[in-house]
Image (cartoon, grey):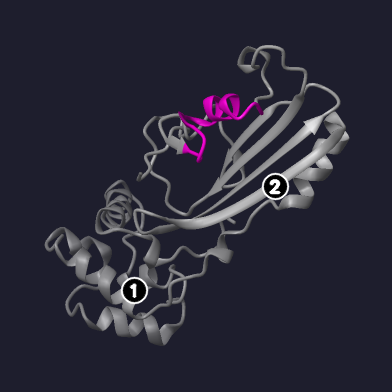
């Protein structure tokens, strides 16, 4: 949830710099100059007073975030210390929609005759992700649902990603489903197709890197 604490293990040095200096910019515009210890306590595994104190002890003379303006290179050391004093969360912390919810929805909306679901986990750019896909063969014409972090996307978030199976490869979810003869859209049907489908694709990751302002297309590792 947005109210859950983030983890220092989900940040690169550049990502932490962006976060820290955005606080500094806010302070310049009349906001509050956050104390360093208070900033550290916002992170998962560091909310306790003692652990935050250990982290901050490595930066004598730096009481507020604005002090990093004089020593921006210290952000890298801050990230190291924050990681040392906290444990990396498991993938399960991210959460998933789950098989049962997709099954119930597809049955209610389209009349699911057959149903398939799978999930996978891994890391991209050092941050964890969970990936789940549900496909139903349906009585009525279905649709394709794509989502990032429990929110629907405007378009295919994997449009620039090369997706491979043992039989074929394609760029993006829509083309992959077409190659797999599972697309819900008539324009992607193969010749003579009569099967109707509904598909849901959901990716959960704490620090997605987007390629567009609409926050849809993702930058991914191969």
Q: Residue at x 33, y 74 (%)?
A: 82
Task: Select label 1 or label 2 by which is in front.
Answer: 2
- Choose between 59 and 29: the one closer to the eye: 59
Q: Which mark is residue 127?
A: none
- Where residue 193 sits: x, y (%)? 72, 17
> Total number of numbered labels?
2
- Does dot 1 land on a helix, a strand or a loop? helix
> Residue tagged by mark 2?
117
Q: Is residue 95 above or below residue 57?
A: above
- Where residue 144 sits: x, y (%)? 66, 29
Q: Is residue 48 above or below residue 205?
A: below
Q: Residue at x 31, y 85 (%)?
A: 54
At label 1, counting other C-alpha atoms closer than 10 Å, the crowd grade (few under 14, some 14-19, many 20 or more) is some
The answer to if 201 sits in the magenta stretch is no
Q: Residue at x 38, y 43 (%)?
A: 220
- Choose between 29 and 82: the one closer to the eye: 82
Q: Is residue 11 above or below residue 118?
A: below
- Does dot 2 land on a helix, a strand or a loop? strand
Q: Which residues are magenta?
A: 164-182
* Residue farthest along the front direction in this orientation: 167
> Which label's residue is closer to the chain start, 1 or 2?
1
- Choose between 158 and 139: the one closer to the eye: 139
Q: Quadrant of residue 128?
A: bottom left
Q: Quadrant of residue 215?
A: top left
- Where residue 155 sits: x, y (%)? 54, 27
Q: CA distance from mark 1 to mark 2?
A: 35 Å
Q: Residue at x 44, y 68 (%)?
A: 42
> Residue tagged by mark 1?
83
At label 2, counting other C-alpha atoms closer than 10 Å, the crowd grade (few under 14, some 14-19, many 20 or more) is some
Q: Quadrant of residue 58?
A: bottom left
Tell me if 148 is positioned left or right of 221 in this view: right
Placement of the C terminus among the 4 image quadrants: top left
């Amino acid at each position: 949830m947005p109210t859950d604490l983030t983890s220092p293990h989900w940040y690169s040095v550049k990502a932490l710099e962006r976060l820290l200096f955005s606080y500094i910019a806010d302070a310049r515009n009349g906001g509050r100059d956050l104390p360093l210890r208070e900033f550290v306590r916002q992170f998962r595994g560091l909310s306790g007073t003692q652990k935050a104190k250990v982290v901050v002890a490595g930066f004598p003379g730096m009481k507020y975030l604005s002090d990093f303006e004089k020593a921006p290179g210290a952000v890298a050391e801050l990230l190291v210390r924050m990681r040392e004093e906290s444990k990396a969360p498991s993938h399960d912390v991210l959460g998933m929609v789950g098989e049962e919810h997709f099954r119930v929805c597809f049955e209610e909306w389209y009349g699911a005759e057959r149903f398939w679901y799978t999930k996978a986990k891994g890391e991209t750019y050092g941050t964890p992700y969970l990936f789940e896909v549900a496909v139903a063969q349906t009585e009525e014409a279905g649709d394709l649902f794509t989502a990032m972090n429990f929110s629907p996307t405007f378009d295919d978030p994997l449009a620039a990603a090369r997706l491979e199976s043992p039989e074929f490869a394609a760029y993006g979810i829509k083309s992959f489903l077409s190659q797999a003869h599972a697309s819900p859209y008539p324009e992607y049907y193969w010749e003579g197709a009569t099967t109707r489908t509904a598909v849901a694709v959901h990716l959960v990751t704490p620090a997605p890197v987007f390629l567009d302002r609409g926050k849809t297309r993702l930058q991914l590792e191969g």
